[in-house]
Image (cartoon, rainbow, N blue to C red):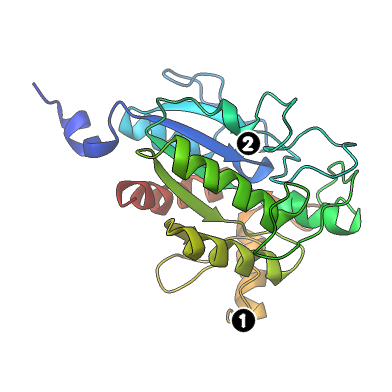
Amino acid sequence: MKTAETAYAGILYGKKWTVCGDSFTAGVTGHVFEDEPFKGMNKVYPYFIARRCGMEIVPFFQGGRTLAFPEDGTFHNSLTDPESECYYKNIPADSDYITIYLGINDSHHEHGKGGDGEDPTGIIPLGTITDNTTATYYGAWNEVLTWLVTNRPFAHVGIIVSNGCDREAYRTAQIEIAEKYGIPYIDLNGDRYTPVMIRSMNPNISEEVKQAVKLKQAVDYPVNTHPNDAAHEYESAFIEDFLRHI
């Protein structure tokens, strides 16, 4: 018999969601849920959604994480590092949903400057959309998505387009790669479907609006411009809606 809770959760109820991300997913405030089912977990969008919908979370997220793996092998917090626990080929075969929200730290590694205080060791160029190497950002996308399409063909895969990158080219790269593979995406930089979130790189949104969003969504503006707890709860609503439609 369906309860009101399972009826609300609908298609998401009981599903396994592998969440790939960086500190904009993992959270930095240290504020945690104090009750089950995710007691002790950070108050971040995956757990807000999973609590509402009765989902299982597979956490492939951690602060400083990149999608690409530097050619010199000097950095080991990457989704495409074969020696890392978060290596993309370790995504469980029974994952019902897989989302990738990575790009902020890749953009830091492009010029070796950790804008979020993260380790920028090892250069990661943006590259081009035809790259077939995990050492560039575009190339890593090609590697990961080709593998997922082939090896996780019935998982619901979605791209969460990163806000907070160092330049707008990383936003457009994610949209281009999503369209190349026919993968649904949600743009947290703000578009006709999605509210603008902190550190948007969308050039069509006014600087006044971007500044207002920073002031209300930052952990501690201007010292720490990671999303605060309220921002995670806010974005969880439209990311949940995105999951329901992929």
Q: Which amino acid is tagged 1?
A: Ser
**Image spot of residue 130 (x, y percent):** 66, 63
Q: Name the residue furthest left.
A: 1
- Specify whether 119 is left or right of 170: right
**Image spot of residue 29 (x, y percent):** 68, 37
**Image spot of residue 244 (x, y percent):** 30, 47
Disc 1 secondary structure class: loop
Q: Residue at x 64, y 38 (%)?
A: 27
- Specify whether 143 is left or right of 181: right
- Specify whether 164 is left or right of 124: left
**Residue 139: which quarter of the image?**
bottom right
Q: Residue at x 67, y 63 (%)?
A: 199
**Residue 3: which quarter of the image?**
top left
Crowding at dot 1, Cα within 10 Å, few <14 / some 14-19 / many 20+, comes out as: few
The reply to whether residue 116 is in sight is: yes
Above or below: residue 134 compared with residue 193: above
* Image mark for residue 26: 2
Disc 2 secondary structure class: helix
